Image: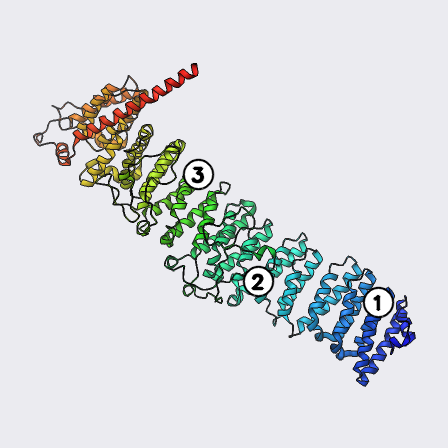
Amino acid sequence: MNAERDLSPLTPGVVRALTDKLYEKRKVAALEIEKLVREFVAQNNTSQIKHVIQILSQEFALSQHPHSRKGGLIGLAACSIALGKDSGLYLKELIEPVLTCFNDADSRLRYYACEALYNIVKVARGSVLPHFNVLFDGLSKLAADPDPNVKSGSELLDRLLKDIVTESNQFDLVGFIPLLRERIYSNNQYARQFIISWILVLESVPDINLLDYLPEILDGLFQILGDNSKEIRKMCEVALGEFLKEIKKNPSSVKFAEMANILVIHCQAADDLIQLTAMCWMREFIQLAGRVMLPYSSGILTAVLPCLSYDDRKKNIKEVANVCNQSLMKLVIPEDDEMDEAKPSMTVPAEPTSEESLSKPEAVTTGESQLPHHGRNELDVTALNQPLFFPCSCERIQVTLNLDGIVQVLDYHLSDTSIGMMTRIAVLKWLYHLYIKTPRKMFRHTDSLFPILLRTLSDESDEVILKDLELLAEIASSPAGQTEEGHGPSDGSDVRPGPVELHVPARAGQLSSSSTKGLECSPSTPTMNSYFYKFMINLLKRFSSERKLLETRGAFIIRQLCLLLNAENIFHSMADILLREEDLKFASTMVHTLNTILLTSSELFQLRNQLKDLKTPESRNLFCCLYRSWCHNPVTTVSLCFLTQNYKHAYDLIQKFGDLEVTVDFLTEVDKLVQLIECPIFTYLRLQLLDVKNNPYLIKALYGLLMLLPQSSAFQLLSHRLQCVPNPELMQTTDSTKPSTSFKRTAACNIDYTELLQHFEKVQNKHLEARHQRAGRAEQLDRRVVL
């Protein structure tokens, strides 16, 4: 810069003025440079023009001396003004040194650089668009500048550039997107504001289709939505709202699948606004894209299910999540059970974004995947290879329903004890829906789901238990449970035994996976799904190991099952299992519970009527099956005889009570039976007391109970009832010579009551033995304590 020849055609006076510390002198020098360049333009002397720009760039704008840099900037701006419409030919040389000064430590220099670039861009207008990325990059840095003057200058330049982009139809969106995707992850508030303002501008330009590139920037937008600044959050909310409007207008051009995982992540955000916005987007995506969203079901459910248990503080999120859940459920159709999973189907590409959180999404394809706790859980990103088609008619599009992933998510949420009640109900509804729509595929998961469904019966909520029972009833009654070869249980007693096992002999417990021919425990065992018997065995195991459940919810569970399934099947199978139960105390308790339900529940009205008359072979077989198990409890056995009008046998049983060990519990049960006799259920029995001649054993049986009772309120009650029995002589009529209908019915039953009585004695002897053994063990324990 000392040698004048190196800086020609600039005169020494111009050079000195450019490096002067006073702005006015630098401005005069700039006017001289403008005049000089105009002359070169007139002469079409491009080499000299380039030379002048090079000198101003290298020797001044990029100089180590601050005043020289200031002179270089004003000189380059003067060149641009002089070049006018021809400045586009030299923009690269003009812009680069100015942008370098954007990084200068001196704030005044950064301001002058901003001013210089403003003049360059103002002259070049649309010609600067090929250099848009470097201009945007520089401006994004100045937007976060700490100096207010620099920031103000950058805002002027920003507005000018936005005007140019808006009025032009040559904007290179493809080239700009990678830079936008990178800068959108800035944490600086001003940089974020700058980014959002540009997105809003680009979105408003009709010729620019930013929607095509939304998957590239959507994650960054949701992160900006969580900014601490209310103004930025509002701007971002507006931008996202505009995008959603555009999606609704033009769903056919939307890449739903590429954004599904982004929404899944942000639907789990801790920030309420982000979560609500993402959930609203998810709702629209499911409704607009339909079955295209199915491959992402496990991820969507991971995000949506916990929201269903939100309280009123997050009522809006809960409501939207509920719509998402219902809409997604409707997408599962029976055809999903028929589709061959091995065949390639319509592609739903799931490309991760450049953000690290999306760089390695896990595809939930098997039940072996580990489902993490809250946060950014694994995503169902089934990657397929064909192009995406918009589902205007969902029925024509085949997508893969990733059932393994869905079941894994549902299992996880049902197993998590911290999950709210509404979420558990939703999970059970989902499982029920899947068993209805895709039973064949769902039965492959039944063995893994069965234990958790049984544990759910201990839930605190009645509503959860009801849904659980509905699901278990569907599993136990579905035809798919015995048509799925190789997927049914091979052994009814082989399901996670509890602390107290129900010991079912091989001949009773063996079940075929496709039929119930193995149920040879009784000739009258009703036909049932192979999982039905497995369910009954495990339910009784549950009651055995968890006595509190039996006491508090046992009757409720069994009554509901009688509504959902065939009551006869339930009582038949439970009686059959209890007949072989080795824990005799539990068997007695369970029989007492079942008997109370049988005698008092309105749900069992038809079954009681069936047993009352014993007109059919099926009813007689059922009576025999119940009787054999009811023998675990002497008083319930008598009540069963009363129900079935087997009064002679009831009398024979009561005669045997003299040989039994009469305990307080025993007398309490007799007391309860007397109370039952006074209930509406035994109205017919009380009326039969009028027919003394034809019902002598009924009266004898009741007197037998009276003799068993001590002088108590129950004794007084039964005694008063028997005192009302009329004199048989007074009750004689002209038809008295006709044979008794009750005797006719008994004779027609063809039931071997002698064998049943022997069975009763045998069972009661076992109970006596067991009580003595327990008493002996207790006595030994007491001795050890004393010692």
Q: Position of residue 764 (x, y in %)?
A: 26, 25
Residue behind mark 2: 215
Residue 437 is marked as: none
User: Position of 676 compared to 305: left or right?
Assistant: left
Which residue, given by chain and number where applicable, does mark 3 sit on?
Answer: 459
Regarding residue 671, the answer to whether it shows in the image is: no
**Callout 1, which amino acid?**
Ser
User: Is 146 on the left-hand or right-hand side of 717?
Assistant: right
Question: Nearer the viewer's eye, disc 1 or disc 3?
Answer: 1
Q: In which quarter of the image is the N terminus?
A: bottom right
Q: Report the Cα–Cα distance between label 1 and label 3.
A: 78 Å
Looking at the picture, does residue 547 appear above or below residue 15?
A: above
Mark 3 crowd level (few <14, some 14–19, many ≥20, 10 Å Cα) = some
Label 2 or label 3, whichever lies nearer to me, is 2
Observer-nearest of 571 and 197: 571
Number of the label disc, if any, that sits on residue 63: 1
Q: Position of residue 98 (x, y in %)?
A: 78, 68
- The image shows residue 784 at horizontal and vertical percentages of 42, 17
